[in-house]
Amino acid sequence: MSAVTGTRRSAASRLGLPELRGHGRFVTGNLIDSVGNGMLLPLGLLYFTDVQGLPPAHVGMAMTVGQAVALPVTFLAGRLMDRLGPRPVVVAANIVSALGFTLFLFADRLWQVAAVHVLVQSGINMYFTAQRTLVLHVTEPGQERAWFAFTGSLRNIGLAAGAAAAAGALTVFGKGALWWLIAVDAATYLLAALCFATLATKPPEPAGTPPGRQATRTEDTRRYLLLVAVNLPYVLAQAALSVLVALYTTRALGLPASAASLLFLVNTVLVSGCSTLVTAHLAPKAPRRAVAVGYLVMAAATGAFMLPALFSPSSPSSSSSLAVTAWVALVAAITLFSVAEILLGPALSELSVTLTPDAAGGFTQGLYQFSWAVGMVAAPALFTLLLQAGPLLPWGAEAVACLIAMAAAPALKSANRHRRKDPR
């Protein structure tokens, strides 16, 4: 290894980055896929209401129906992954998403809105069912969590870049730009599919049963089901960022609509900029311990989100000071939330493919992704109902769920029975 290569690797290690050399297409595919998500997914409702002229409430119901119908696709993707491997499933997922967004251009009835969202959500479910296993098939052994942290950073960067491009286009060209954004978005998914299709993959090799451990398949299944349950509070937390924060800051706290966007920006910057560093140098090395610490921090974040709603102005003159207090609490909350996300995301992803001998297989990955899909579908109704009953209830419920998950995390000890030979 040359001195220049060694220096570059040393710098990458200090930044917490995995070995990136030779993985350009994999990195590019992940980034492009995220740009596509950021560019259009937040604007789907706006397109069908303002461009196609459909009633907002009806469009929202059609979108929910389409996403719910696509839930079983996680298990179908898992079966395909067992037969074909993760790479073809990831490629197919991007093609399905491209088809779904292309059909946006021709959907002007509610049943068509539901149908195209079945396709789009199917692509998303397929992609995330296979993507974690694909990481194991593409990258070097022993760098799983570093890659999960890095791809998480890429996702945040891509989402932010896509959202910024969409916002710029809408600002310059108005809502008429939505049609072109959809067409460009479909093309980005096809480009991502091309990147993934040309990857060289190598599946992990079984490492055998560790000495003194004769776990049965039933015990492994129970442990994996525990992981799925432990993952749910994290899923709801991710949904809260896009659903609950906007409603809470505007309706419960009386802040401007831009508040949610500013908090989302802080979160995106922190997660994209600090994930690899924190994961490499500060997070506990054992993933179950990182999960426990992450949920403790997430519980603290939900408590900070609750603080502004605990106080109300006693007079009109005190409203400005209350707003300042609310902003201080919210910035502290989103900072804690981001730290928790950095700790939880890579560690839970690592556990999802290493917890049991069959963890990286199709059924278990389909089950794990099903928890994401169900949580994302259920979260809007759950959070809005709790918020209607009281501004503290959704945050309190999430805090309790996080503390329960923290208590369960020590049981998530990886079997570590799969390995790959390190070519070096």
Image (tube, rainbow, N blue to C red):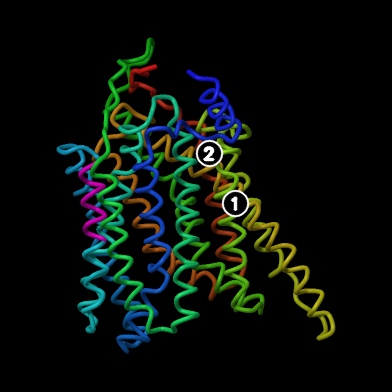
* Residue at screen point 33% across, 23% down: 418
> Which residue is nearer to you in this view: 113 or 380?
113
Measured from the top left, where is residue 349 in percent x and y?
42, 40
Q: Viewed as shown, does residue 127 lie left or right of 11?
A: left
274, above or below 308, in the image: above
Chain part drawn in magenta: 87-97
Amino acid type, residue under disc 1 in the picture? Ser
73, above or below 287, in the image: below
Taking the view exactly as shown, the residue that stands out farthest to the top is: 211
Q: Which mark is residue 338?
A: 1
378, above or below 82, in the image: below
> Which residue is nearer to you in this view: 351 or 85?
85
Measured from the top left, where is residue 236 in percent x and y?
47, 57
Who comes first in sequence, dot 1 or dot 2? 2
Amino acid type, residue under disc 2 in the picture? Val
Element under disc 2? helix
User: Badge 2 is on which residue?
Assistant: 291
* Residue at screen point 32% across, 60% down: 188
Q: Which mark is residue 83?
A: none
Main SS of the magenta part reads helix
Q: Nearer the viewer, mark 1 or mark 2?
A: 1
